[in-house]
Amino acid sequence: MDIFTVSLWGITGAALIVSLVKDKQKTFNSMKMAKGMMKNMVGQIVGILLLIGLILTFIPPEVIKDVLGASNPFISTIVSALAGSITLIPAFVAFPLVGSLVDVGASIVPAVAFLTTLTMVGLVTFPLERQEFGLKFAAARNIFSFVFAVVIALAMGVII
C-alpha cells in the first residue's frame, strides 16, 4: 500500500477510537447503519464489476487504444465528451470504468473528457431539468458544463 492509503487508514482508525471514547453507543449504532448500507450496495458493486467486464469484453482493447489513444486527440476528446454527455451512469460506476479504459490504452485527455461530461452534463436528464429550472438555465448550465469539462480534460492532459 502507498503512504496515502496507509495515512487514510490511520486517520480512520484514530477517528474511530475517538468516537468510541466519546460515545460508545452512538458509534456502534453508526456502525450498524453502515453495515446495513453496505448490504444494500453489494448488488450494485457486483453490477458495476459485471458492467465494466461486459464493456471491456465487447469493445476490444485494440479498438479502445485506436479510438481513444492513438487517433487524433482533439477528435477523440470531443467524441468522448459527447458520449459522456449522452450517457447516464452513476459516478461510482464511471470512475472504475474510466480507470479500466485508461489501463487498456485510452489517452488521459479523452478519458477525463468522458468522465467530466458524464458527471457534469446531462442530456438524458435535460427534459426534467428544463421542466424544473427552465429552458434558459438548463441549456446554459449544460453548455457551460460541456465547455468546462473539455477545458478540465485539456488541463489534465497538460498536468499528467
Image (spheres, grey):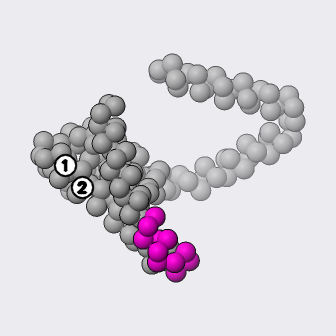
Left or right for 120, reference 107: right
User: In the image as oriented, which residue stretches furthest toward the bottom?
Assistant: 131
Q: Which disc is residue 116 wearing?
A: none
Secondary structure under badge 2? helix
Disc 1 + disc 2, Cβ < 8 Å: yes
Q: Would residue 49 be visible to someone looking at this image?
A: no
Q: Is residue 154 magenta?
A: no
Amino acid at dot 1: Phe
At x 12%, y 46%, the residue is 71
Badge 2 is on which residue? 78
Q: Mark 1 and mark 2: span between their CA atoms?
A: 6 Å
For the stretch drawn in magenta, the main secondary structure is helix
At x 55%, y 21%, the residue is 6
Q: The magenta stretch spans which residues?
A: 131-141
**Which of 50 and 119 lies nearest the eye of the viewer?**
119
User: In the image as oriented, which residue stretches furthest toward the top?
Assistant: 3
At label 2, counting other C-alpha atoms closer than 10 Å, the crowd grade (few under 14, some 14-19, many 20 or more) is some
Vertical placement of 156 versus 151: above or below? above
Amino acid at dot 2: Ile
At label 1, counting other C-alpha atoms closer than 10 Å, the crowd grade (few under 14, some 14-19, many 20 or more) is few
Location of residue 7 (image quadrant): top right
Badge 1 is on which residue? 74
Secondary structure under badge 1? helix
**Which quadrant is the C terminus positioned in?**
top left
Location of residue 139 (image quadrant): bottom left
At x 47%, y 21%, the residue is 1
Left or right for 23, reference 38: right
